Amino acid sequence: MTQAITLKDITIHPVVEQQAPFFDAMEFFPTLTKELLEENRAWLEPTFIDPANGRVVLCVQSFVIKTAHHNILIDSCVGNHKPRPARPAWNMMNSDRFEKGIAAAGLRVNDIDYVMCTHLHIDHVGWNTRLENGRWVPTFPKAKYLMADRELAFWTQKEKDDPSGVP
């Protein structure tokens, strides 16, 4: 489990949803040369590059910031039960790791006051909603959701242009 960071009366808790080797290093970094990768392999493996398959190890995570007055969730990862066919590790995921991470920070979903969406990619907004009795409902029902107006406008237009779904 990743350690929390305390700064005076603020505590930052990482909430890890997934950490795994997701992408081939040469594909993920298109300008990377094989020579440069080999020069740096000793310190990259095993933390940043999986030696078994050469894939970049990435961490999909949120952060909960606990202050004296508010609990703020920064991004909400991939989420469960969402169709993500282009990403097999995320497609229709069903895991309790994110919820356990929130609980490890000493919180429940009703304790989150704000959800700050840094941007609206699928791996940053997935837990904004959850499937409950066949309906999508807010995961954090008491929270106010914060996001850039330009980001919201972009994705709202994209959904209008293609209502079949966002990749």
Image: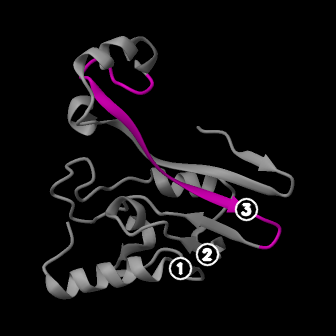
- 157 and 34: which one is in front? 34
Determine if the magenta segment contains residue 162.
no
Looking at the image, residue 127 lies above or below residue 156: above
Q: Is residue 56 left or right of residue 96?
A: left
The amino acid pointed to by label 1 is: Tyr
Q: Is residue 130 left or right of residue 166?
A: right
Residue positioned most to the bottom: 160
Looking at the image, residue 69 lies above or below residue 92: below
- Local crowd size for mark 3, using a 10 Å CA cut-off: few (<14), some (14–19), many (≥20): many
- 71 and 40: which one is in front? 40
- 138 and 38: which one is in front? 38
Q: CA distance from mark 3 to mark 1?
A: 16 Å
Looking at the image, residue 62 lies above or below residue 156: above
Numbered range of the magenta stretch:
47-69
Q: Which residue is mark 1?
A: 145
**Tag 1 and tag 2, C-beta contact below 8 Å:** yes
Q: Which of pointers 3 and 1 lies earlier in the amino acid sequence?
A: 3
- Local crowd size for mark 1, using a 10 Å CA cut-off: few (<14), some (14–19), many (≥20): some
What's the mark number on residue 114? 2
Secondary structure of residue under mark 1: strand
Q: Is residue 112 left or right of residue 33?
A: right
Q: Which of pointers 1 and 2 lies earlier in the amino acid sequence?
A: 2
Work out which quarter of the rendered image holds the N terminus and state it. Answer: top right
**Spot occupied by residue 39 in the image (x, y as percentages of width and height):** 36, 12
Residue at image position (66%, 54%) is 105
What's the mark number on residue 66? 3
**Spot occupied by residue 140 in the image (x, y as percentages of width and height):** 53, 75
**Spot occupied by residue 167 in the image (x, y as percentages of width and height):** 20, 66
The amino acid pointed to by label 3 is: Lys
Residue at image position (51%, 58%) is 99
Secondary structure of residue under mark 2: strand
The amino acid pointed to by label 2 is: Tyr
